[in-house]
Structure formats: structure tokens, C-alpha cells
Image (tube, helix red, strand yellow):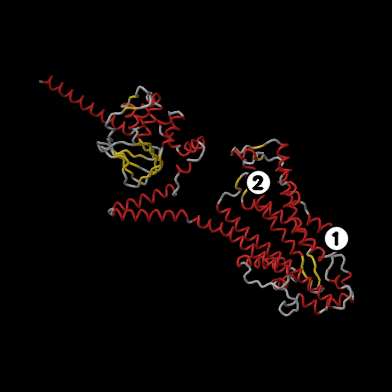
Amino acid sequence: MNPHTKFIQQWNKVLAIFCLVAIFVDPLFFFLLYVQRDFNCIAINWRLTKALVIVRSINDFIYFFNILVQFRLAYVSPESRVVGAGDLVDHPKKIALHYLKGYFFIDLFIVFPLPQIMLLLVLPESMRGANYAKNLLRAVILVQYIPRLFRFLPLLIGQSPTGFIFESAWANFIINLLIYMLASHVVGSCWYLFGLQRVNQCFRNACHSSSVPGCLRFIDCGIDHDRNYLQGPKSEQWNNNTDAIACWGSPSTGSFDYGIYGNAVPLTTKTDMVTKYVFSLFWGFQQISTLAGNLTPSNFVWEVLFTMATIGLGLLLFALLIGNMQNFLQGLGRRRQEMQLRRRDFEQWMRYRRLPEDLRRRVRQAERYTWAATRGVNEEMLMVNLPEDLQRDIRRHLFKFVKKVRLFSLMDEPILDAICERLKQTTYIQGSRVLNKGGLVEKMVFVARGKLESIGEDGTRVPLSEGDVCGEELLTWYLEHSSVSTDGKKIKLPGQGLLSSRTIKCLTNVEAFSLRAADLREVTLLFTRFLHSPRVQGALRYESPYWRSLAATRIQVAWRYRKKRQNRAHSSLSG
């Protein structure tokens, strides 16, 4: 499969979304554990466990399918990257061997259902309870989470071996925001788990200081079908132990120093998943945003290290994600700022040159319309670095209106490509004049949008709109008044150029494309034989308002001359 096909691009987007869900789901396993206040022990929520296992299994299946896709996905040869060719290797055996030597074993490890096996198979068979599950969950989730982040984060950032997954600026902004929320989610989930671990340590300290025999066993509530050991006189002593009750009481009045986990202790006694998760997410978001500035840890080593890790993660996110968001937000207003700076430069230049107010008004109007038509984008600069065949196809798409002119509909593709290659975008404001009567015709103008009016020598007005051409008489003039030199490379022209016999005035703002006289001269040199054909000449004169007006004028002159001859002949006969 070609990695640049539309299917693979869409699949990468779907995979990135499921990877985001996967790394959100894993820390939720920590919220399965809670403290039962009636028994002073740690329990596990089995109903929520089954739901999380199903969601985790779905994500694992999606990523397993991606592993199968990798065995059929062509890759860019490393040797070709050195020379910049980027050749694709599509041999099945080479693709499989390349993936096996790469990330196959890492992908196989992160898709292996360790939490599901531990919760559904190992834990019920061992007849152990939540405390044992807590230790296994902490080990399994953290061991799998690091390689998952290593493989998933590049997808979330939007990069794949074949290029960017999310090309939209808004999509990248949302991804950066979700990654920031993901970091808060992970920090809050770890904070809840470590708070539960400190409650467990408080229970153990209370057990050591009490006279209840076998009280360490009562810290674990066991599983649903094995709670007989919680019913008895020994368990009653543990349930009523004042030191154990103080562990899940108010952290400020207790003897155990919870440090930064003081607010997590009341959460560990709640069975409502939403309450625990939302507050933990808030805590993580707050600490990352403030760089843990309001935290004062106890002298417990792991608590201090967790606080330092939170500060470091906050600094990293501010340097990367917040910086990217800031660039995006600044990018939204970049065009507007460029427009304002450009207008300010125009105002300063007009003030320095002391232009009259009428000219200033026209300059402002032209600048506003030019910006609206191009959005400040220089199309020529964008297309310079593109391959030549791609530039040609883009021009054919942009200049479809050229074929609306009957003259150019008769031309072959090479001639149209040569014309389109030399067209320049031009804008005119309402009231501007494209051609002036008696002035030199220096360009052919193809109207792309807007309305114009052609005023002939006799005052005849002809409307022009999208698809029309003005200045087309320049082409015929070049063909009739030129001669090719002996070397076949130069065109000799008379000293005087073609003078316009009409005025072209813009009735509205006009967006057009112009073909300069020098470029038109070059085109006539390259395709002289074709342009001299009677079919092209007939189409040019039939479609042109200039030639139609000229023909009408000559017909009128010939008619008047004939009428005069007839009058003279009639007068001589009657005399």
C-alpha cells in the first residue's frame, strides 16, 4: 500500500484519535481503587473495571490492526533519503523485514492486554484483593505507559513517516490543547493513586501501633465473593480502631503527614467516579499551570520527587505546547497585522509625497480591493518552487476562463500554456481606465471578475464582463506589422506602436489577468504560423469589439461613399 494514498491518510487520523483515547484510558484504572470507610480497607470497583477493560480492549484491537497494516505499508528507502529521491520500497518481504527490525516488538508489547489479564484472570484466581491489585496496576500501567507515549505522542503531535497528519491550523491547536489536558489528566491520576498509597501507609502504621492480631489482612477488603474474614470479633476491633479511622478523617487533625496528598484523602473514600476524576483533573491542571507553586511536600522522598516531576512537566509544556498555541493565535492575526502595516506605509508615503486627497482616496480604495482579491498572498512566489508540470496544471485550472474566448478555444494546449505562463494578475478599481483613446495599447487584458465598458470613436458603448478580452487588436497588429529576421530569433517592428481607438472604463472593481506587449510579442514569434491561419484571424476579428466596431465604421464609410457616387451620377443624368 502506498503511504500517500487517501485511505492511509484517513487511517492515520483515525489511529491518532484512538491513540489519544488509549492514553487517556490507562490512568483511569487508578480510580478503580477506593477506601471503604466501614471496614477501614482498600476496595476495588468491579463494575467500573469491566467497562474500562472493554474500552481498553477496543483500543488495543485498533492498534493491533495498525500493526497488520504496517506489514503491507511501503516505506521510503533510507538510502534514497541521502540523495533526496525518496524512493518507496514496495516489496512485501522487504517491508515485513523492515518493520520487524523497527518498532514491531515495541508495538507488540504496548498492545499486549496486561491490565485485562491481571484484573480478569490473575486477580480472581489468586483470591487476593484490592491492595494486591493496586500494586499490580501501578507496575503494569506505568511499565506499558512509557512505550505507549513514545509511539503515540508523534501521532498526536500530527507527524507520521509520510508527513503531517493534521494539516489544519485549528486541528493542531486542538491537539496541543488536548495534550495539555492529557498531561493534567496523568498528573491528577497519579496524585490520586499516590494519595491512596499514603492512606494505605497510614493504615499500616495504625496496625503496627494497635493490638489487633492479623490486622494487615484487614487493610485489604478482598474480592466480592471472599469477605468472610471481614466478619468477626477481630475485624470489629479493626473497624473501630481510632488510629485507622483517623487515616481517612481530616488530614489537618490527624497525626499522619499527607503533605500534597491532603486533598486526595477525602476523595479516596468516594465511590463516585466522576467526582474523583474531575477534582483530580482540576488538581493536575492547576499544578501544571502554576508550576506547582502552591505545593509544600512533606519529607517523604517519593512525594518530593513527584512534586519536582510536576514542576518539570509544567515547564516543558509551557515551552512547547503553550508556545505552539501562542504561535497559532498570533498567526490568526498575522494577515491583519500585515495589512495594517502596509496601509500605514502607504499613508506615510502619500503624506511624504504630498498627494492630493483625491489621489489618496483612490490609492486607499485600490489597496483595499487588491488585499481583498489576493488576501496578501503572492501567487507567483508560491508557485516558483513547485515542479514545472504542477505549475502548468495549476495555471490551466486558474485560467479556465481563457478558453471561454472563441479565439483561444481554437488554440492547441502548447499555445495556451505559453499564454497562461505569461499572464499576470491585475486589479482595477471602479472608474479606472484600462485603455485610453489615443494612447498606446501595451497589453491584452482578460477579465476574470467585474464589469467594464468599451467606448468607441463614435461613442458606441459595448459592455464587457467575465470572459471578455480587451486590447486584443494588439495581437493582430503584431502579426501584420512584424517580420522575422534572417536568424529566426528577432522580430523587427516599426518605431511607432499601436494606438487605441477606444476607451475601456471599469464600471465596478475588476479582477483581471494581463498579457504584456513584450510577452505577446514572444508568443507571436513562437507560434507565428498558427496565429496567421485564416481561422484564427477570423475568430479574432469576429469576437473583438474593436474589430467589429472598425468593420461597422468602414461599412458606414463605404455606404456613404456609394451614396455620394449615386447622387453625383443622378445629378449628371438629370442635368
Q: Residue at x 34, y 36 (%)?
A: 443
Image location of residue 143, percent across then percent down: 75, 57
Q: Is residue 397 above or below residue 333?
A: above
Question: Mark 2 — residue?
Answer: 11
Label 1 SS: helix
User: Between 496 and 266, which is closer to the camera in this rendering?
Assistant: 496
Q: Residue at x 27, y 32 (%)?
A: 496
Which quarter of the image is occupied by the N terminus?
Answer: top right
Q: Is residue 188 above or below residue 394?
A: below
Label 2 SS: helix
User: Between 80 and 369, which is closer to the camera in this rendering?
Assistant: 80
Q: Amino acid at mark 2?
A: Trp
Categorize mark 1 by other alpha carbons within 10 Å: few (<14), some (14-19), many (20+): some
Say the numbered circle drawn on residue 528.
Answer: none
Which quarter of the image is occupied by the C terminus?
Answer: top left
Q: Is residue 78 above or below residue 570?
A: below
Q: Earlier in the sequence, mark 2 or mark 1?
A: 2
User: Between 404 and 394, which is closer to the camera in this rendering?
Assistant: 394
Categorize mark 2 by other alpha carbons within 10 Å: few (<14), some (14-19), many (20+): some
Image-based side of 3 in relation to 364, left or right: right
Image location of residue 47, percent across then percent down: 78, 62
Image location of residue 144, percent across then percent down: 74, 55
Q: Quadrant of residue 8?
A: top right
Image location of residue 479, percent across then percent down: 34, 27
Q: Amino acid at mark 1?
A: Pro
Q: Quadrant of residue 555?
A: top left
Q: CA distance from mark 2 to mark 1?
A: 38 Å
Question: Mark 1 — residue?
Answer: 124
